[in-house]
Amino acid sequence: MNALKGFSAPIVAGVVLCGLWQGVLSLFNPEGFVLPAPSEIVGALIDNWDDVYQGTRITGFVVVSGLIAGIILGVLAALLVTRFRTANETITPLAVAINAIPIVALAPIFNNWFGLTSPRSNQAIVVALVFFPIFINTTRGLTQVDRSQVELMESYAASRSRITREVRIPNAMPFFFTALKLATSLALIAAIVAEYFGGRQDALGPMITQSAGLTRYDDAWAAVLAGTAIGAVLYIVVTVLERVAMPWHSLIRSHREET
Amino acid sequence: MNEVPSQGEEMSTGEAAPTSETEAKRVIDIRGATKVFNPGKSNQVEALAEVDLAVEPGEFVTLIGPSGCGKSTLLRLIAALIPPSTGSVEVNAKPAEQARLDRDYGMAFQTAGLFDWRTVTKNIELPLELMGWSRGDRRGRAKEMLELVKLAEFANHHPSELSGGMQQRVAIARALSFSPALLLMDEPFGALDEMTREHMQDELLRIWKETATTVVFVTHSIPEAVYLSTRVLVMSPRPGNIASIIDVDLGERRGATRDDPAFFKKVTEVRVALRKVEE
């Protein structure tokens, strides 16, 4: 439970904000045309529960599977680049070049490759977007180590893989988790925008475009809310993972705050 | 020849007269070692020129000199963290690289270099883990070492919870944990305030006496060099070499030693030698 500490304040703030939203709209905008009130959005959510639930599952799967694949590729590439100079000389410029491509703009092209109604193309977009921040940050964490820690391990005649395990990987953890937080929000944005262009038609992305096209803004907002829920759950999962994986790190932070 | 302080049974042989027998027992034997960084390139640096150095068991040798005089480089040659360009470096009568692989020395740096992700105990156990000690033996030794550096009550703290001086003591405990015959220290007290520093110097001397270790110590501070050492090596820069050797015999160090005229005389002697080097 300790890991969840600190989430209560934003929840209260969110509830207050929704209350204000509802109140202001009921006073000044009874039409509910441009911006539906929270009560209408919740109403739309309940009315369309089955569709929204299905859409959340599909989009959620695209986000999570793309994230996992992107993380695995990014971390593997970072380990390779740190270990082998030739890998560094080939992979790093390539990754930078790929990062220069506006990946989301490739969505229509990927649809052509993977099939217009296949979630594969959406997943590919997510993987491509997640890969770069994970790769760059993890590499930085694996290489920017305290020189004396490495020399110390060498003075103990430790093997290269042992140095990686004892020094480089723990050192890379804060870098990795910073990248992961960035990557989760990127993954969600990438998945929904990619879905605007293709993939399964019962996902959240098409639900938003179709509802908005039919001026059913409360339905569109209900789908946006479901997307927000995916983002929130992912953020909480990452934060809890971070605290479990690096208990010493929160200790450093709390100690710094004290002093 | 400087006096080697008697330090218990193990060291008794170290007091023998200088013969070929003691030569074989030298802890460090460097002959004509040079170090050139980036050879053949435009940024080539001649860091060390033909250094000869012999250290006998039980000595406390300090390397002092202006920045860039190669004192850290010399220490890293002894530790076999870098190879010499020419010449030979022997530690415990074998090539330095073999001594490294045999874990013949412990090392401490200016930054404590503790692992934030390990508790104090686990930090001290690190070399023992690498040497394959059993869990129980590791725990027992870590406990002993923590008592030696007077940090027993911080066994389960993380390094970030300790002060700079305490972290440095943990680093020394870690370096000593596997009882190496040789301790290599690269400005270990450089980042500490003056009071902590003097306290740590006394601690180190106490440990040196109790454990009968040979120490090679790099520093910028003249009083520190004089207070700690049996021998001060003044190094000259560009390329680094040992310019003069000053034997220090102040007997047992006490609080009063720092105010002793004999202490100041040695400090002046080292200062004069350093000035010559700077010119």
Image (cartoon, rainbow, N blue to C red):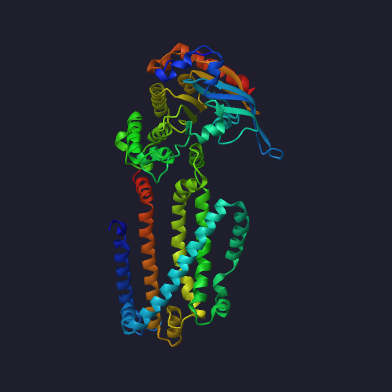
Residue situated furthest bottom in the rendering: A214
Question: Which residue occupies the foreground of this view, B207 or B154?
Answer: B207
Residue A209 visible to an observer of this rendering = yes
A192 w.r.t. A152: above or below: below
Tell me if A19 is positioned left or right of B50 in this view: left
Instruction: Give the quadrant of the N terminus of chain B.
Output: top right
> Which x, y percent locates residue B160?
38, 42
Residue situated furthest front in the rendering: B21
> Which x, y percent locates residue B143?
32, 34
Give the residue displayed 57% in from the left and 74% down from the top: A106
Give the residue displayed 39% in from the left and 35% down from the top: B170
Question: Which residue occupies the foreground of this view, B146 or A230?
Answer: B146
Give the residue displayed 44% in from the left and 50% down from the top: A170
Question: Which residue occupies the foreground of this view, B53 or B252?
Answer: B53
Tell me if B51 is positioned left or right of A166 in this view: right
A217 w.r.t. A146: above or below: below
> Which x, y percent locates residue A256?
37, 46
Quarter occupied by residue A28: bottom left
A172 w.r.t. B88: above or below: below
- Number of dots carrying numbers: 0
Residue B4 visible to an observer of this rendering = no
> Which x, y percent locates residue A16?
30, 69
Instruction: Give the quadrant of the C terminus of chain B.
Output: top right
Tell me if B239 is positioned left or right of B24 in this view: right
Give the residue displayed 45% in from the left and 79% down from the top: A205
